Image (cartoon, helix red, strand yellow):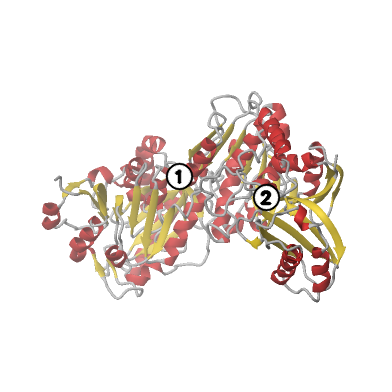
Amino acid sequence: MTQYRFLATSPKGLGSLLVPEMKELGAVDVRETVAGVTFNGGLGVGYRACLHSRLANRIILQLSEFAASRADDLYDGMANLPWCDHLSPSSTLAIDFSGRSEDIRNTQFGAQRCKDAIVDVFRSRGLDRPSVDTRVPDLRIHVRLHRGRVSVGIDLSGTSLHQRGYRTEPGKAPLKENLAAAVLIRSGWPECLEAGQPLVDPMCGSGTFLIEAAMMATGRPPGLDRKRWGFQGWLGHSSSQWQTIEADGRSRLRAAPEGVELRGYDGDIRAVRRAEASIAALGLDDLIRVRPKALNTLTRPTHRSMPEGLLICNPPWGERLGQLSTMELLYRELGQVMHREFQGWKAGILTAHNELGRAVGLRSHKQYALNNGSIDIQLLLFDLGSSNRLAQDLNKEKVTEGGVNPTKEGREPLSEGATMLANRLVKNRRRLKSWLKSSQTSCYRLYDADMPEYAVAIDVYEGIPHVAEYAPPKTINEEAAEHRFQEALAAVRQVLEWPADQPIAAKRRQRQRGADQYNKLDQTGERITVREGSARLLINLNDYLDTGLFLDHRPLRLTLEKEAAGKHFLNLFCYTGAATIHAALGGAATSTSVDLSNTYLKWFEDNLALNGMSARQHRAVRADCMTWLEGCDRKFDLVLLDPPSFSNSKATENTLDIVRDQIALVDAAMSVLSSNGTLYFSNNHRRFELAEELKQRYRTEDITRQTIPEDFNRRKDIHHCWRFQHPLT
């Protein structure tokens, strides 16, 4: 039997895994080199490597090696090879050339000299010359120049072996399949298979990890679905031998070990649909289950006990779906989900930035350097035991889970007025207690100028107080107003047991116009994470007049979440995008969020990342809403229109007055609403009345009362809200 020398190329860092794989396929004299792994064997070994290798990029049948530092040496060495034994005159060819020397300064020139030598061999024998086809050649020839030595071979694979042949739509920036296989092996998936353990991918994208894991579980050769091979245009190809090896590969298919389950989740429903299509194409529906689910709602499957398993994940790296600072929020949430839901499991996480790896907040016991194309990445391995604690205070972003329980301490007695206010706070908290238990929110208004003497709004965010003073009338003495404000802070500190050494976020609330509403009051940069139903949202208690979350709109946001499934959602004047987060968690097919403020749109993107959602599916648009609506050429099924009462932003020449402009604004929003869609129009103008013209033009319903939450029931005019639909035809 004729023996050949082969080269299996692979991504950086995979050589040590590729050596045992080749040996298992029958290769001998296997050696790891800079270019990959070389090995000896008969033609069948080369065929089996093409069909079965999970890790290789290409399998090269090596023809020759010779010295060549100059272009003429390269030409002569190539011309001395028996090319008529490898391809016919009617064949097409392509040259993959790598390397350079002083005389050969670019790969295009090197490939050209190689091609000239090959076609001249045919001409010298009076034969037609083969033609070049760089896209789909009959034979692809691999030439590598390194330190004055040239190696020449035939690419038996044709195209990279990471292309398994099953994908119907690759999606954007997919992880290469052979790299995914290597990650699974490094992460311990073969050992999990032997133990009958499950695998979960919380951000599965197009399902690469799941499918590679399923192929391993069922013994499926990764090349079984490829339709075209490089060796098919080679004159030395043995069709009968290949058919035997391919049939043997099919005969090795088996059921997955008992107990093995593969589950994938992703916040991008389009990615889930791509994964489902690929899984169905391979007939792996019974083994792999994928579902649209945001990262922050992920829990360990509960249909059976799963004390151990493997969590594997390839989150966005910053280059693809967002900026690095935004991605840190996503990685932090991933670490919290891992720590909270998957105790006892192992985990493997890919990242392209050390900062993102640290943002996970868990100790990695092993790291591997890899690359995906031109991007250097790291695989981080974790043991998710109870001792692997989450890191604290990532990038000065204070994370609060479940509220604050400060120790009691001695306090100075309250004044008579402060005592009166404290009693009211206690009364309000008692009244709200049962509602808070059922509302699934830990952010609420405790007090809103209930007593005229203390004109402040007191909110609680995850147990943290926030006090905003309404600007006192000019008739009130400034010194007296300041005294009462300090009394209010003292009452809050005592009732909420807030430590004396920790400041209370306190602001004077005044009407803000135009760009002033975006101006910073402070420069702390500190944000906390709060929960509202299934959503996690970032707020800032100190730096802006508002915190990033309008608490009175909570019922409307929850309504949008219930109605959004499968719909295209539009959020106009989106602010920090809390309503979009709820719509996305409710299963919105897509969303578009429009606002003129870069600050708010960046905040919205951070909220998306915190909830594990894709910025491709949920798009942010910086624009004046009226201008954007005039140019919009698509329809939406669900629209939220929540404009400010007044705006004269420097970013636009126009001013917005909600009373004056309501007809034009609603008409523009309704123009992009689908025929059976719903628009919610809300605003915070206390004396707002809906124009009769709008009531006549559309089906309208005043739902203000239904959208005022329990903690705002003393302020019935905190906002107004209507449901709009097109007239029935």
Q: Image check: 353 left or right of 552?
A: right
Quadrant showing the C terminus: top left
Query: In the displayed structure, does residue 458 sit left or right of residue 166?
Result: left
Question: Amino acid under label 2?
Answer: Gly
Q: Is residue 282 above or below residue 111?
A: above
Q: Residue at x 79, y 40 (%)?
A: 45
Mark identifier at residue 488: none
Q: Position of residue 446 (x, y in %)?
A: 37, 47
From what the image shows, is residue 120 above or below residue 574? Answer: below
| Residue 333 location (% of width, % of height) | 56, 47
Res. 316 in view: yes
Q: Which residue ends up furthest to the front in the rendered image?
A: 126
Q: Give residue 12's quadrant in the image.
A: bottom right
Secondary element at tag 2 = helix
Residue 134 occupies which quadrant of the picture? bottom right
Lower position in the chain sequence, tag 1 or tag 2: 2
Kind of residue at badge 1: Ile
Residue for point 46% across, 59% down: 603
Observer able to see residue 339:
no
Between 678 and 326, the one nearer to me in the picture = 678
Q: Is residue 154 left or right of residue 295?
A: right
Residue 11 drawn at (x, y percent) = 72, 53
Q: Which residue is mark 2?
A: 233
- Decide which of 335, 706 is in the foreground and name it: 335
